Structure formats: structure tokens, C-alpha cells
Amino acid sequence: MRISVIGCGYLGAVHATCMAKLGHEVVGIDVDGAKVAALSSGRAPFYEPGLNDLLAETLGTGRLRFSTEISAAAGSAVHFVAVGTPQKRTENGADLSHVHASVEALIPHLRAGDVVVGKSTVPVGTARDLSKRIAEQCPSAALAWNPEFLREGFAVRDTLEPDRLVYGLDDTNSGARLILDEVYAQALAEGRPRLLMDYETAELVKVSANAFLATKISFINAMAEVCEATGADVSMLADAIGHDARIGRKFLNAGLGFGGGCLPKDIRAFMARAGELGADQALTFLREVDSINMRRRSRMVDLAREVCGGSLLGQRIAVLGLAFKPNSDDVRDSPALSVAAQLQLQGAAVTASDPEAVPNAMRRFPDLTYTESVEEAVQNADAVLVLTEWEHYRSLDPQFLKTLVRRPAIVDGRNCLDPVAWRDAGWTYRALGRPRAAAIREADTVLASRFSEGPLSGGATAPVA
Ligand code: UDX
């Protein structure tokens, strides 16, 4: 099948490459010449595990190419629209200018029977408007809405092995369904669920899934606030409630909260759209989800101030982690970068480190001191803050790091370290939502050794606290 993918940002670049891996003949189109040049030479302009190898492999087959010209879409049977829908500059709604511009540019190149497939995350109602526009200009082409659920860090796997395929269709057109079935033949042969629905439901599936995920994270972070007020331990709480299959342990990791290019902007755009539709009351809880999320950042700054003895002025703070989550170099709306910048603004001297995100962070906040080395970052530090849970940070040696710092104080912003190991090495250990973490764990260790078992096991995704 000949496929064009319009927009080669995060979503589009991964989608184009994966479609070529599936055996399709693909052209990725983007107005940014530098992006097209990088992708054409086998280098993704962002960090995503496995993507560069797959790019090299698929470019090598001759099935994948990139272009800055929209005319390169002519001749493809399917045209995926994967352009960005950023938050508007002055309000919360989504900026759809790229979606509209790319569909307008594509229309003159459409042929009878072509299918335009929307992948971008859009406010409900967008697909219906676009389908009318396409019908006016090219009545024999069709539109389908096929939202994408990929996570950064797992983007290749999520695209090749999706949990589910959602097709939003105009009920008068079954040709689009058949063509999408051909595109996704491999996933369908593996038995992956395919759900057919109208445009509006398909658009809502995407934004409501993200709203649910954001709510789950803010729920546990709200519990973290209560734990801080009561002396309880939010990691143990999450493990215990997560054993209930109706709740589940995934996405219950309390800490600095959510960031990135999707969840924060998507919940704000969802609220804005519900307001336009007169359904704003239905989503007022999302405002609270957003505020709980932002409060975690201030709490982190407060904890840093506390371990520094009450003032940040002149304190040397090592920040470990800048990306909005591990296995990513993305600093869009990153809680870690936001905390690092606030600390610096409040008078601390911040040295920040991250395995992948330093160049992106440096572009946003040139005033911080950056290094890729943890050892350099913590040199003579008055406090060390872990703000992104990179695997590498979980295995840091507290004994060794203690020899480098000025004051052994660590704040675990992602509940990813073992409090006992750090306290045993002589560190002051603080975490979000776990005011007495180490004391509780010491009791667990005694209990566990008494029964000659490993540490009490918790949920699937979080380290046992
Ligand atoms: C998200 C959705 O998961 C994905 O389905 C959608 O297509 C795009 O948006 P992504 O932004 O890549 O994906 O990251 P995700 O893994 O969802 O994490 C989002 C944020 O939540 C990160 O900042 C992460 O650190 C935070 N998070 C996640 C928590 O704070 N606690 C958790 O338990 C899980």
C-alpha cells in the first residue's frame, strides 16, 4: 500500500517508519527541511529508543523516504495527518492551524478513492468539519479518524503492537474501513481489537483516555498530599490499592506529576472544548487534576528549601533528571525542568544533569549549569534532587556520592530510590508523599528477613518502598 504521512514530528516520524517496517511504501512529508534531512539520513531529530535502527533498516529497503513537498503525497492511497496541535498561545484550546493547513495543501493532490486519516489529537468536532471540506473539494475521497495512543519511550512498540485500533468513520463510507484494514493487516492478524465508531466518539476516545490517565496520576498525588499531612506512605498505599484489579497498580506512581507534550495540553484543550459545547461542568474536575499536578512542583521546591535549612539562597543544588519522563529527551512541560528553573529563580545555584535531555533543556533555560555527568552535578552540592526516574539513578551508589557532596541530603521526586540504602549511608532522605518512608521500610526489612523472604512485594511497576 502506498502511504503518505504528513507531519514528521514525534508521532509522524515514528508512524512513517513503522508503516514502512510493515511493508508499505511510505513518504513522510514535513515543511521543516532540517527535520526531513535528518530523517532522510537515518537520524530522528529526537531521542526514541529503537527508532534510529528502524529508520536505517527501512530507508535501506527503499520503502521509506522523506520530502518537504506536499506534492510527494500524490499517488498514495492513504494520507495520514500527524501534525501537531499545540496549546494556543493565549488560551487553553488547541491550535488547529497546522491540521487545517495540511489538509488544504493535500486536497489538490487527492484522487478518487483516497483516504485521509487523521491521527493528530484534536477537539471533538474537527473530523466532521474536515470531512465536509474534503467532500466539497474532492467528493470521491474519504476521511477516517484513527487516534494514536503511543507513549514516548515505547513509541515503536506501541505503533507496531497497538493495544487497540480505533477507526472513526463516516457511516456512509465503508471503503475507508477496508483500506485501514489493509494498512493494519498485521495487527489485525495478531487479533488486536479493532473498534469501529463515528468521528466524534473516536476523537473523544483519545482525549478521554488521556484525561483518565492524568486523573489517575493526580488522584495518587492528592493522596500523597494527605500522606504528607498524616505521616502515611503513598507508595505503600498505591501498592495496596493497586492489588484491586478494578483499580490496578499502573499509573499510580506518586511524585512530581505528569508533563510532556500530551497530557497537560490535552486536558486543557478538552476543558476548553467542553466549554464551547456547553458541557463545561462535566469537566470541572479536570481543573483540579491540573492544579494538583502543578502543586507537586511547588511542594518539591519547598522540600528542597527544607533540606537546605530554610533558605535556597546561595545553595548548590544538583538536579538529576530534566526530561518529563525517562527514556525521552523531551522537556516540553517537564516538571523536572520547571522545578530546576524555579530553584534557580529563588536564588539557588543549580547544576542539572540528564542522560539525554540536556541539549533541549539548555535551549529553554540557558541560565542553569548543565552537565551529563552525575558525579559532576553532585560535586559540592548542598542537596541532590532526583526529578526523573532514569534507571541509572535507581542504582546510584549512596556511599560513593556522599564523598562528593557538601551536605548529604537527597530529595526523591519520583519515589524511585531505596530510602533505607540512602539513610544507612548517612544521607537525609526526603520524598514526596512518604514522610516516614525509611522507618516503615526498616520494619519491613526485619519482617522480611524473619521469614527469609525478599522484601515485601508491592505492585508491578513501582520499586518497593
Ligand atoms: C501519554 C499517553 O500515555 C499516551 O497514550 C498518549 O498517546 C500520549 O500521552 P506520554 O506523554 O508519552 O504518553 O507519557 P506517559 O507515559 O503517559 O507519562 C506522562 C507523564 O505522567 C510523565 O511525566 C510521567 O512521568 C507521569 N507519570 C506517569 C506519573 O507521574 N506517574 C505515573 O504513575 C505514570
Image: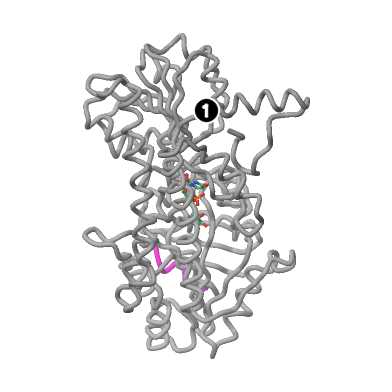
Task: Report the residue at 46% width, 24% height from top.
Answer: 429
Image side of residue 74 versus residue 296, left or right:
right
Callout 1: SS? helix
Q: Position of residue 4 (x, y in %)?
A: 50, 66
Task: Report the residue at 41% width, 43% height from top.
Answer: 225
Q: Is residue 74 magenta?
A: yes
Image side of residue 245 versus residue 87, left or right:
right
Q: Position of residue 402 (x, y in %)?
A: 47, 12
State the image quarter where residue 384 is shown.
top left
Q: What amino acid is found at the position of numbered circle 1 in the picture?
A: Tyr
Q: How is the image coloured?
A: one colour
Disc 1 crowd rating (10 Å Cα; few below 14, some 14-19, many 20+) is: some
Residue 368 shows in this picture: yes
Residue topped by disc 1 = 393
Q: Position of residue 268 (x, y in %)?
A: 34, 61
Q: Which residues are magenta?
A: 69-75
Q: Residue at the top extreme?
A: 403
Task: Report the residue at 37% width, 81% height from top.
Answer: 129
